[in-house]
Amino acid sequence: MSATPRLSAAHDTATHQSHRDVTNRLKRANGHLQTIVTMIEAGRECTDIAQQMQAVIRAVEKAKTLLIHDHIEHCLEQAVGPASRQQRATIEKFKEITKYL
């Protein structure tokens, strides 16, 4: 059995607006990871390496947040239809609290 739960067929192939941006962010993070490996192999200062590691962590976190926010908007609107101003405010508050995940 797979550890990842299966979603409905509609979600299996869904491409959200943010996917291109998320992919680009992750590709940049991957490039930074390769740079970190090179830095370690070259014997660079630990503070320089740690700084680059922090940049990778932040890039991945930002990509995750972007993906989650887009998913919230996409799936909620698909499930309930266009949101009113009050509903949109509630969604925005929900997105704001997700930064603590």
Image (tube, rainbow, N blue to C red):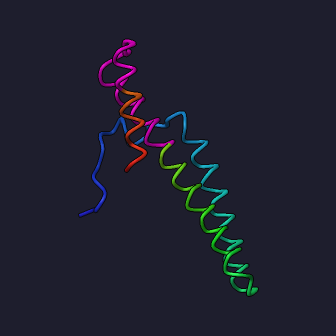
Measured as percent of width and height from the top left, residue 81 is found at 34, 17
- Occupied quadrant, residue 56: bottom right
Q: Residue furthest left?
A: 1
Residue visible at 59% across and 49% down in the picture: 23
Q: Does the magenta stretch include residue 75?
A: yes
Total numbered labels = 0
Residue drawn at x 30%, y 25% is 79
Q: What secondary structure is the stretch in magenta mostly built from?
A: helix
Q: In this view, does 57 lie to the left or right of 11?
A: right
Q: What stretch is highlighted in magenta?
A: 66-90
The location of residue 67, given as percent across then percent down, is 48, 43
Q: In the displayed image of the protein, which residue is found farthest to the top?
A: 84
- Give whichever of 17, 40 is nearer the camera: 40
Q: Residue shown at 29%/49% (left/top)?
A: 6
Residue 51, placed above or below residue 83 = below
> Relative to 27, is 44 on the left or the right?
right
The correct choice, above or below, for 16 with respect to 84 in the image is: below
* Relative image position of residue 14 (x, y in whole percent): 44, 37
Residue 57: which quarter of the image? bottom right
* Residue 91: x %, y % from top left: 37, 27
